[in-house]
Amino acid sequence: MKRSNKRKKLSKKQKTLLWIIFGVPSGIVILGVSIMLIFFWDLTKQTVQLTNTVVNPYKPSLEKKVFDNEEIWPTLPSPGENIGQLTISSLDLAYPVVQGTHENELEHGIGHFAGSMLPGQGGHVLLSGHRDTVFRKLEHLEIGDQMTFETPYGDFVYEATGFDIVPADDRTVAVPKDYESLTLTTCYPFDYIGDAPDRYVVHTELIEHIP
Amino acid sequence: MKKFSIVLAITVLLVGLLPFSVSAENSSAQKLADSIAQLGVDEVDYLYAYLQSIDLTEEEYNSIVTNTERAAEVTEGKSHPTDFSNAEKTELLSLFNDSTQKAHLDVQIVDHDGNSISLSDYNFDNGVALNIQDLEGNQLATVNPTIEDLNPGAISTKVDAIKTAVDAKVELDETGEFVPMPEAELPNTASNLPTSILIGGIVALLGVIGFIPAVKLSRKVVNAN
């Protein structure tokens, strides 16, 4: 009882003093813990940064590999690089051809499938394009119609030999061939809204190479 | 007669070896395509072509092989991501970074909007993806890692895939020409422009329909006065 009475009798000055007495060490503790936390955070960040940085940052050669046995296209074009122009005069169609068939590349023209051969290499060349832009008229192409693929290595003239409609997950069209041919593909049906379930395929054969 | 026999023997040998050579080429091409797919990339074709378009030096090749062997040692016997010590996690990340650089690749860590993020920011609210680019900054492929990819088994598979890919690349280099992909799905040429135009049309139509009650209501208001 006496003790509680004593407490009540603490003056304002005494209370302030008590605040200072306990406040100073408390402040120091908070400051210390804060410093520890800040530097611990920094240490963790630095550790992660170190793992993200190879000890000796490496700069490989920027030169492209030159294929010894390729007389034309001795180096592969980079994605988005213009590799020529496709002209189908019967459809009044002429668009640039770029390397690659991903979304970014198809915005710039007809895309050359990077995993396929290039004209003149004696294999299967595969070109794809949007059905609502560059290949909008492809459904009107007829067997016997000719198309010219102008490249830095000459003009390659192909003739349409047939058409196919295959499912989107088909894996029988984009395959290597041991003879020169060009295949054009686009989404099908032509008036479909959204991701079309099929692909429209135009088969051709090489009839002339004008160097 | 003797000359004829020699010519015949050589012809038979060449004809016999040709299919073998083509089949070895196809097998290496399949190996390269499969190993790239095992890395979990969204599209295989650009990486497939790019790896054939670069000259790997012997030092780079050896370094990648050494890294993959070391990574295999680190992952051996582990069954859960928590089995890795911090030092092992750090080492795996370093080995990965070093291997991608030696393979002439630039791997950027980005969020799902494509904005570059730093691992040290610890801000992964908008997801994490790995953008794989060539040295000119061209986008080759994207990996969207899942939590399962952190399992030692998955890491081990990917480590093996890197080793198989560079081995296949070296085999294909010996042909001296570009070897096309063995088989692939046809490119997706769909664009969302028609869908967006349709949505715009529907919204505009709804707006026009909305004029009907608006006109009726306005007439009532005018007549009431």
Image (cartoon, coloured by chain):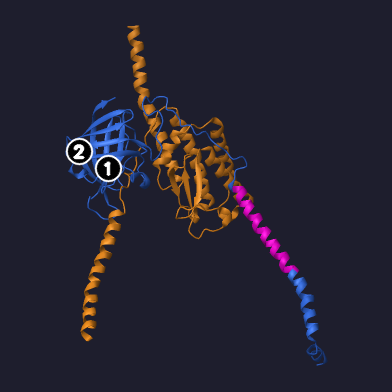
Chain colours: A blue, B orange
The answer to whether A176 appears left or right of A5 in the picture is left
| Magenta part of the chain | A28-51
In the displayed structure, B218 sits above or below B174; it is below
Task: Give x and y (percent) for residue B8.
Answer: 33, 14
Closer to viewer: mark 1 or mark 2:
1
Closer to the camera in the image, A7 or B11: A7
Mark 2, residues whose alpha carbon is within 10 Å: few (<14), some, or many (≥20)?
A: some
Labelled pair 1, 2 in contact (Cβ < 8 Å): no
Residue A10 sits in which quadrant?
bottom right
The residue at which mark 2 appears reads as: A162
In the rendered image, the residue lying farthest to the top is B1
In the displayed structure, A85 sits above or below B9; it is below
Task: Give x and y (percent) for residue A13.
Answer: 80, 83
Instruction: Name the chain under label 1.
Output: A
Task: Give x and y (percent) for residue B175.
Answer: 42, 27
At a point 72% along the width and 66% down the height, the residue shown is: A31
What is the secondary structure assignment of the residue under circle 1?
strand
Q: Is residue A82 visible?
A: yes
Residue A67 sits in which quadrant?
top left
The residue at which mark 1 appears reads as: A185
The answer to whether B154 appears left or right of B29 in the picture is right
